[in-house]
Amino acid sequence: MIRTRALTKDFAVGRDASRTVHAVRGIDLDVAPGELVAVLGPNGAGKTTTLRMLTTLIRPTAGTATVAGHDVVAEPDAVRHRIGYVGQGNGAGHSQRVVDELASQGRIYGLDRRTARRRADELLDSLELSAHRTRKVSDLSGGQRRRLDVAMGLVHTPSLLFLDEPSTGLDPHNRANLWEHVLRMRDDALATTGEPMTIVLTTHYLDEADTMAERVVVVDHGQVIADDTAENLKADLAGDRVVVTVPPSAAHDAAARLTEVARRVEGFREVTRTPAPRDGVGHDAATVTLDVRAERGDAYLPRLLRAADAAGAAVETAQVHRPTLDDVFLALTGRSLREAGTGATDDSDTPASERTAA
Amino acid sequence: MSTVDTTTAPVPTRTTPARAPRRGLGSLARDTGIVLVRELRPVTHDPFSVMFGLVQPLVFLALFGPLLVGSLGGTTTGQEVLGGNVWQWFVPSILVMTTLFGTSTTGANLLFELQTGAHERLLVAPLSRSSLLVGRALKEMVPIVAQSVVVVLVMLPFGFELHVAGALLGLALLAVFGVGIGSLSYALALAVRKQDWMFWVVQQTLVFPLMILSGMLLPLETGPRWMQVASDVNPLRYLVDAERALFAGDLTASAVGWGWVAAAVTAVVGLAVGIRSMARSAD
């Protein structure tokens, strides 16, 4: 359905040709019919630029892309006929009426006037917008507008749908509602045409990529740095985290002993100790935390506890954390996805607290 | 990127609801029609919106017109330059002014669609780039004609004489000119889309000198020589002169011919610049 080879986009900054931004640096991507792929990465990673090349909005600087059987540069019109697109903004004109805008889209894709109206009503019905049929787009709520965007992307029942950050700016309820509709429309398409709809979305919501996508493509600095199912990425790249604490009274020696024990238990990968050993006086009074990265944390923890007992090392609390895609990104780049890109870091959003929350 | 679709899809991977083979001018006309109908919908649903564009011209008619009558109406210069009936001189000005204000600001609508994502949505759809501009520009004719008819009707009780044939030709001339200015306004919106405040700066900076140097508000005959020279290169002046001749019922005046030349040149240049800008509007 999609095949790109060394897809590249450079943007000139200002008039000086020497200052070029390499937004996308040679992406090879293959998407088979029926896949639901999330392209995940921080702001500025090149997700949207890639999508804009695949949807014929901008021309690649180099490389090739075939979308729905046609080359994006040589046959943009053929590509446009076959793809649905929901951009970051609202696709409907604000001064237009809801049903008119949908019918206009239908006309653009070659439906006659009556069929376009019927298709518009059909979509409004299935996206629960019928009550707002003749309202102006500017009078719709954010969630309603987003559903209208999806309807506009699906007017011509495309076999390939692009969603560029579809749920950005929506509250959790509306996000869930939007996804419910998208997935149902995908099922409907399969039922009526007998062919699965391919969906490619970009997102910087970790949980969205994690729960919705069947495949996650991680992009950073304009390159694909990982490409697999969310499960495999998490198992292969991040591993589970087992966090144990040592009581303050026993802290210093016990922590050192427990670290040694942890290293010998099957499934161990690496351990971080906070506070770090030998970082000055006074920490004897504090709880020491060991953060162990392990395969199958649920199996590792009982083994660790038995070994700790046998060695006489005291353990106060123990928890297992399943990894998130943020851990995957951290393992791949050494940066947290939330801090990467914009460079803006929220102080309260420490790595520890965000991983526990997931 | 070609502006006219000459490719047809040889191997559809799947049957979409309808995909007629579309090529060349037929496709351009069809796409333009779709864009035109889409642009006209808000106007037809809310016809009164067209009348907002009349506020400024009507203010000029109501507040500037009487001053013009008072200061020039009785004088000999006034008799020579304006003719016997000041309204006959001033109402065509107001029609050109309405057209100029309405069409030169229309790019703001596109600017808004550029910001919301509605324009992007149309760029992803299989529409020729030219049609996105031509359809919008043609739509400008509708408010121009509607507003002009209202202005003329309002002025009839005040002694404005209507010469029907001339008036109809005058409206057609305004419509052609409006397509040109509208296209330029869209081109401006596309050019400044990353600094949208620039739109109003440029529009205001251009519109007022053009307006004053067209002899629209006050006769240029009483102004200094340099202003008269400057007005010679202002297409708006030829349009104003032509409208005055047409609304006076003088269909064969040479001013009318020059007016058509000015309107046609404006339309051709506007469409060319506009289509070019539209084709590059995705980057």
Image (cartoon, coloured by chain):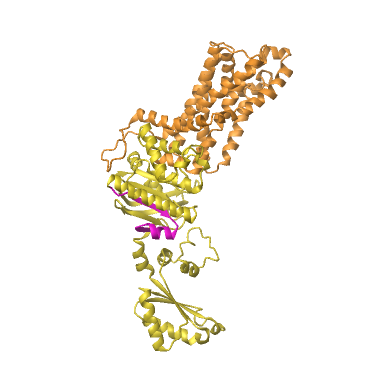
Residues A193 and B71: in front is A193
Query: Closest to the observer: B103 or A171?
Result: A171
The magenta stretch is: A195-217
Where does the image place residue B200, in percent across and percent down from the top left? 59, 37
According to the colouring, which chain is yellow?
Answer: A
* Residue at the (34%, 30%) spot, across then down: B24
Q: Report whether residue A9 is seen.
A: no
Q: Colour of chain B?
A: orange
Residue B263: say if magenta: no
Residue B119 makes an appearance in the image: yes
- Specify the farthest residue to the left: B11
B242 shown above or below A307:
above
Residue placed most toward the observer, A8 or B49: B49
Residue A137, compared with residue A250, is above or below; it is above
Vertical side of A208 occupied by A196: above or below: above
Measuring 63% from the left and 28% from the top, which residue is drawn there?
B56
Provide residue B174's location: percent of width, then percent of height.
Answer: 53, 22
In the image, residue A207 lies in the stretch drawn in magenta: yes
Please indicate whether residue B64 sits to the left or right of residue A263 in the image: right
Residue A236 x, y percent position in the rendering: 34, 68
Instruction: Identify the residue at horizontal 52%, vertical 44% (top origin).
Output: B194
Q: Nearer the viewer, residue A62 or B63?
A: B63
Q: Position of residue B198 (x, y in %)?
A: 57, 40
**Image quadrant occupied by the C terminus of chain A:** bottom left
Numbered disc total: 0
